[in-house]
Amino acid sequence: MKNENIPADIKSKSLKEAREEIDVILSKLENQETNLDESINDYERLVQLNKHIDELFKKKFKEISKKE
């Protein structure tokens, strides 16, 4: 998944906000009463959030590496 596939509402989230949304999605996915279509959408959003967090870490790593 490329960075441009990440929706703007996810790109604007801080690390903390993204992590909090991931926690909510994981709780929903663990609930056995959710339907398949909703679970698929939640899973796709979870993947996008994870990719966003990965990009934030890479960006921070580059910033730290340049300082050293």
Image (cartoon, rainbow, N blue to C red):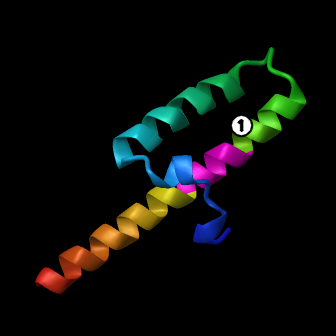
At 39% from the left and 62% from the top, the residue drawn is 56
Residue furthest top as drawn = 33
Identify the image quadrant of the C terminus: bottom left
Residue 62 lies, with reference to residue 18, above or below; the image says below
Q: Amino acid at mark 1?
A: Asp
Which residue carries the number 1 mark?
A: 42
Residue 2 lies, with reference to residue 18, above or below; the image says below
Residue 59 magenta-drawn?
no
Q: Quadrant of residue 39?
A: top right
Residue 2 lies, with reference to residue 22, above or below; the image says below
At 60% from the left and 24% from the top, the residue drawn is 27
Q: Pick the residue in front: 17 or 65.
A: 17
Q: Quadrant of residue 43?
A: top right
How would you classify the magenta stretch by its main secondary structure? helix
The local crowd at label 1, few if under 14, some if 14 to 19, many if 20 or more residues have their Cα within 10 Å, is some
Q: Which residues are magenta?
A: 44-50
- Apparent side of residue 47 relative to residue 19 in the rendered image (left or right): right
- Apparent side of residue 45 relative to residue 19 in the rendered image (left or right): right
Asked which secondary structure carries label 1, the reply is: helix
Picture coordinates of residue 54, whole percent (x, y): 47, 62
At 29% from the left and 68% from the top, the residue drawn is 60
Picture coordinates of residue 20, whole percent (x, y): 44, 33
At 63% from the left and 45% from the top, the residue drawn is 46
Picture coordinates of residue 13, whole percent (x, y): 43, 47
Q: Pick the residue in front: 8 or 66.
A: 8
Residue 68 lies, with reference to residue 5, above or below; the image says below
